[in-house]
Image (tube, rainbow, N blue to C red):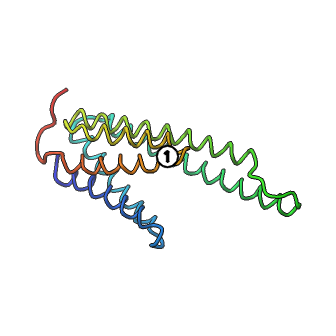
Amino acid sequence: MSKQTKQLGSWGLVVALVASLLSAVIPFAGIIVLAGWIAAIVGYFKASDELGEPEIKGNVVKALIAGVIAFLVFFLGGGTMVAGMVSQMREGGGMHFGGTGFLLMVVAWIIGLVAAWFWYKANSLLAERTGVNLFKTGGLLMFVGAVLTVILIGGIVSLIGEILLIVAWFSVPEGSEAPQS
């Protein structure tokens, strides 16, 4: 794998992770997170081309599309919940979340699971083609983290998965041919 591909994948994920962790104290850190993820995705695309494995790119695209849809549905659900609470407060009926907003949040979570599954599949293929099994482990932990998001420990599991993916990117040998499967 080329040095540029390794750098895009590894440093893109490092930037995304660090900016995510600092987003509580740095305004507009989301832009830096987005830039990191774009670099990482370009790294996955280049790795897919260099390894002759178009399915990696296909799974990343599917994960990206499902992730964007989940993000949009999540914010639609959140907006619906806020609108329902404000409406009920004006009527003097107290504050309730509302079934529609909750349902949209569940739908967003399910779509997010689909995105995480395709992300896992892309990393599994990358592990097979590079011989670096940390890709598969990191992708699996990110999927498990997405499942466990409901009980609030998923973020920690996903964080560990992302760290393993960073280590995996740095572990890929430069300029070597991928092992044949």
Q: Quadrant of residue 90?
A: bottom right
On screen, residue 134 versus residue 35, left or right, reads left
Give the vertical position of 179 relative to 44 (above or below): above
Question: Total label count?
Answer: 1
Tell me which residue sits at (48%, 43%) in the image: 146
Tell me which residue sits at (35%, 40%) in the image: 139
Q: Position of residue 177 (x, y in %)?
A: 12, 38
User: Residue 49 or 1: which is nearer the viewer?
Assistant: 1
Quadrant in the picture for the N terminus: top left
Tell me which residue sits at (37%, 58%) in the image: 17
Which residue ends up furthest to the left in the rendered image? 176
User: Residue 151 or 44: which is nearer the viewer?
Assistant: 151
Q: Residues within 10 Å of mark 1 (few under 14, many from 20)?
A: many
Residue type indicated by callout 1: Gly
Give the vertical position of 138 relative to 32 (above or below): above
Q: Quadrant of residue 110?
A: top right
Which structural element holds mark 1? helix
On screen, residue 127 versus residue 70, left or right, reads left
Quadrant in the picture for the C terminus: top left
Q: Position of residue 148 (x, y in %)?
A: 50, 41
On screen, residue 85 versus residue 116, left or right, reads right
Tell me which residue sits at (48%, 68%) in the image: 24
Q: Which residue is mark 1?
A: 67
Q: Position of residue 99 (x, y in %)?
A: 75, 44
Give the vertical position of 76 relative to 177 (above or below): below
